[in-house]
Image: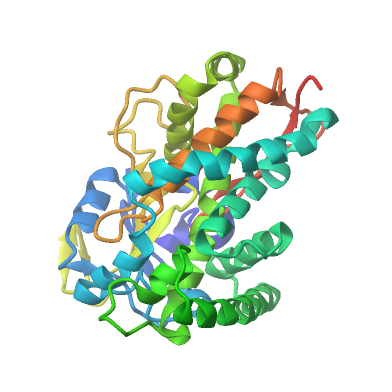
Amino acid sequence: MNAGQSDLTGGNLYRDPYPVYARLRREAPICLFDSTQEWLVTRWEDCQTVGAKEALFGPSGSHDRPEARVMGMPNVLTMSGEDHACLRQGIDANLTMESVAGYVDGLARPIVLRYIDVILSKGSANLTSELFEPISVRTIATVIGLEEVDDDTLTRWFHSLNGGLQNVTNDPAIWAACDNARMEIDAVLRPIVERVTSNPDRTLISHVVHSGMPKGKARTFEEIMPTMRVILLGGLQEPGHGAANAAYGLLLDENQARAVAADPHGLAQRAFDEGLRWIAPIGVTPRLAAQEFELAGTTLPKGASVAIILASANRDEKRYIDPELFQLDRPRKQHVAFGYRPHFCSGIFLTRAIGKIALEEAFKSLKNLRLSTEREVQIKGWRFRGVMDLPALWDA
């Protein structure tokens, strides 16, 4: 299938990539997307091959990719070897399973309950913008060290950066919003970085500045900002959209919604994890072919930009039964919404914990939670995808 003769367009991917991915898996599992000049890898098995071969498919440091303009270079996603491992020490310091288990409930649950209390008496809300996104940005911002930045600003930042990443039509207004967000982020973070450079604290910013460095040395503002933009976009977005996506899946089936409402503590984590598989908040991870390589009958040239389509792998019919359905009782199988090592998402434990708590408290507190029929659910994006408008009702 030639990309020019298929459904493979930027508009179709942004509106709903899953029918496009299904066709690619059937007809052209390795396909060149002309709009971005990257080879899309869509089948589970082939994604595993590319993801596991770090020596052959290393991180993409190409300045032609949108990540370069949005995040800046080099960043944690474009680095490899000792430099990457050293930087990951700072990022991962407070994000290990043990560390997260020690603080997440005391941090996240009061935030979740506070936002639920704001909407509880209303009986209706867009659960994404009024609950799950605010929970996500407020919790992650606290971990990062941005407690003083308001919710609206944080949300606008990650939506603007996200827009730049998915701007396949090169819309100047989208780029202007992205560039403006970058300038605001830099202006806010510069004094914070200067402060923690002299007076380290327990925030993620401080760890990124200091951890893994020789004694008496610290990373500069210019060195860490590309990586901080990566963290801001992925970190602020993923828990909230993961929870919204899972909530939508549950609310499509009254029996599944009732099951979680009856046992939120026992089923919320399973629901969140199935939501990550069903609609992956981060749907693509880029790679660069270090040499010519044949994959599924297609030769990828040396230097080719390769996109592992995590969202497509998570719906591969050869791995999952009825993969297009959200199934709370689906047999447990690993998904790849968090990517592949060594660039596996640092925030996996924090994201899963926030998502679990958010769904647990929402389905416990919002009685008879159900979809509203007053307007349609809106879902957008392909590199980053989420339920943007989740209109819901409950018995207030």
Name which residue lies at 29% across and 31% down: 333
Is 307 left, or right, of 382 in this rendering? left
Which quadrant is home to the C terminus?
A: top right
Name which residue lies at 66% across and 72% down: 174
Tell me how the rendering is colored. rainbow
Name which residue lies at 34% across and 38% down: 316
Q: Position of residue 157 (x, y in %)?
A: 64, 66
Q: Position of residue 126 (x, y in %)?
A: 74, 40
Q: Is residue 66 above or below residue 244?
A: below
Q: Note whether residue 34 is visible.
A: no
Is 97 left, or right, of 14 in this rendering? left
Which quadrant is home to the N terminus?
A: bottom left
Q: Position of residue 11 (x, y in %)?
A: 59, 58
Q: Is residue 302 above or below residue 345?
A: below
Name which residue lies at 54% across and 19% down: 260
Is 279 left, or right, of 53 in this rendering? right
Q: Note whether residue 219 is visible.
A: yes
Is 393 left, or right, of 314 in this rendering? right
Judging depth in this view, the residue of 308 and 148 nearest the camera is 148
Q: Count how many numbered circles sit on residues in the image.
A: 0
Judging depth in this view, the residue of 264 and 381 nearest the camera is 264
Q: Is residue 253 above or below residue 165?
A: above
Q: Position of residue 115 (x, y in %)?
A: 71, 41
